[in-house]
Amino acid sequence: MSGPAPMPGQVGRRIGARAVADLYHQSHAADFGLSEEEFARALDQIASKYVSAGTRESDVLKFLHTLRLEELALTRACAAGEERAWEIFLTRYREKLYDAARAITREDVSARELADSLYANLYGTETRAGRRPCKLNYYTGRGSLEGWLRATLAQEYVNHYRRQRRLVSLEEKIEDGAQFAAADPPSELPPHPRLAEATDAALAALAPEERFILASYHLDGRTLAEIARTLGVHESTISRKLERIARAARERITDELLRRGMSPRQAEEALEADVRDVGVDVTARLAQKDGATAFHRKGSE
Amino acid sequence: MADVPQIVRDRLRRPAAGGEHPDANLLSAFAEQALTGPEREQMIEHLSRCAECREVVALSAPEVKEERLAAAVAAPSPGSAKRSWWRSPVVHWSALTAAALVVVIAVGERMRLREGQSASAPAVASYEAAPQSSAAAPTAAPAPSEPTESAKLTKAPKMPRRASAVGASKSINAFSAPGKAATLGGAPPAAFAQNAPPAPPPASRMRMKPSANSRGDMLSAFESRSEQGQAPAASVPSASETVSAAGASPATAPPQTAIVSERSEQPLAKRASLTPRWSISDSGAVQRSFDGGRSWKEVAVTDGITFRAVAVVLSDVWAGGTGGELFHSADAGEHWSRVRVEANGRVLSGDIIRIDFSDAQNGVMTTSTGETWTTSNAGADWQRQ
């Protein structure tokens, strides 16, 4: 690229202009029509997001080398409206995006709606405060661009699904005359305070990964293979861990109940009684509880 | 699998108190095992308490699609018994018995058909008449001493033949990219700044049927071609699945017609699934899919080149990439040869970023340096525009 030398940005000052130039070269950003200055600005933004101020120069450089530089350059060039970049982006990702949407929605019409809504954001067709933000600017190169697109699609889908579910639920209730119905009785009795405390203590003693496995399997209904793939381990490892975690959790709860003054028999009965009273639709509760608000911040991305 | 008390589910289910959700960058990096150790720990800590993010991670996983479908039916739903009725041994054995019965009937039917083919002529008539008869399979069918011509052809694998059906081309990157828009902050290129949803249908689909989308387009295209008497899909990788060659007439090649007749009995969806789709992977490799894009497999073309564009015309595949390297396969990607692009001593410069073939003979390439090269004789000669 000819022209004036790029201004040394934050990253340039920390790792040196030469290192930035090397990264620029590696990214093939010039092929997409992205200048070195624009590329350095993107690196600045990403480094400020993920790297703390006191990080050593070598570590910053090491981190930047872990980024998907070419895909990062491609997205920034697309966001800048570069024709060649869009051409390449469409060649590489258009079909994948529709395929991913179809895999998520399992239905063609919804998939097209989902993918189109994301495309609208990617192209920046909406005007906000006089600007047309392009969602591709949010890609930081931490994972693959394809993975980011899939995750973004999934977020959109979850948001949309939950919004729609809330609306449909309300409409159905009105159609069913729910507004004239008596107030719903409490869906369940609160758990015994000592049992709840003991369970919370037992769960708090679990490692995050153990809680994740437990929740994925027992709440979300994921298969062992899915959980294993997410964590990058073998399926049999998850199977063994689940057995161990379930057994340990039960023992820990029993211990906690004993510490709280229950006899062994009372503790066992408390656990068994709770198991018998499974009149709660966990899936429904899981699906409806605070879903929309939980994703509110994500939607602002 | 050991169950947990209901109280454990209830307490696990409680939403996490506040806190930011990880963005799509971190979620996808987590799924790809690309986070640092501390980041990964933070992510798992969050996921262990956030059902929504767990759902996003699960939905965006690339390879669990089929499992998810099964899981939706088969996985133990929260709060329900772990062993469903259909998991009982009775159902399992019933299913196995039914499957075995189907296999026995299918084998018997096939043997009966073979017997009918060898005993009567012409082969086409006997084959087509056979399915109309009773489904009762003979218990034993003596093998013919010499297989008929029809049987030989049915068994013998055939490589797909090239056909020059104009208009049946399929180019991955045929869509016209947007022009550079002189608008604010990364505004969309003009071609996309429309009121209508900006996403265009994939190029391959546009070529087949511009107004439609999805699998239905492919089926429509197949139906359309079948009506015109053309081969449904020439770029079929598996030799045993080869359909026919364009132009083979029943009068001149009756045995082949018999095969076509057999194949035409297959569901259109199956034939559509045999047509590979081509694209370029994230890492710049040529890849193809035989299941409508649900899974992709890289195709070994050559080492050391990042591919940027691929175009397909029936069984002809063209792939170009960095350094102006162009490769051609005439057999649906089984074998590749390097194509040197030059004219009057001048070679192509830059990377090949786009390839378009309107038919097997006529193609256009664009490079990253803005050059446009054309051919009108299937890549034997090139002209720079």
Image: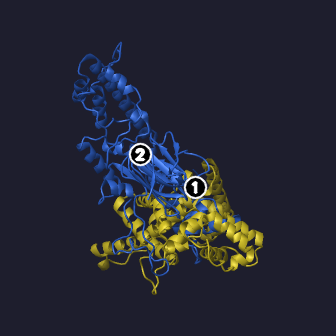
Chain colours: A yellow, B blue
Q: Label 1 is placed on what type of residue?
A: Gly
Residue B100 visible in rendering: yes
Q: Which chain carries label 1?
A: B
Which mark, by number, is residue B378?
2
On the image, which quarter does residue A227 sit in? bottom right
Q: Nearer the viewer, residue A117 or B180?
A: B180
Q: Label 2 is placed on what type of residue?
A: Ala
| Residue A137 at x, y percent in the picture | 54, 74
Quadrant location of the N terminus of chain A in the rendered image: bottom right
Q: In screen coordinates, is A252 left or right of B104?
A: right
Q: In screen coordinates, is B346 left or right of A199?
A: left
Q: Could you classify mark 2 by the number of other residues whose Cα lies within 10 Å: few (under 14), some (14-19), or many (20 or more)?
A: some
The correct choice, above or below, for B13 with respect to B204 in the image is: below
Residue A72 visible in rendering: no
Q: Nearer the viewer, residue B198 or B314?
A: B314
Q: Mark 1 points at which residue?
A: B323
| Residue B88 at x, y percent in the picture | 45, 42
Q: Could you classify mark 1 by the number of other residues whose Cα lies within 10 Å: few (under 14), some (14-19), or many (20 or more)?
A: some
Which mark, by number, is residue B131?
none
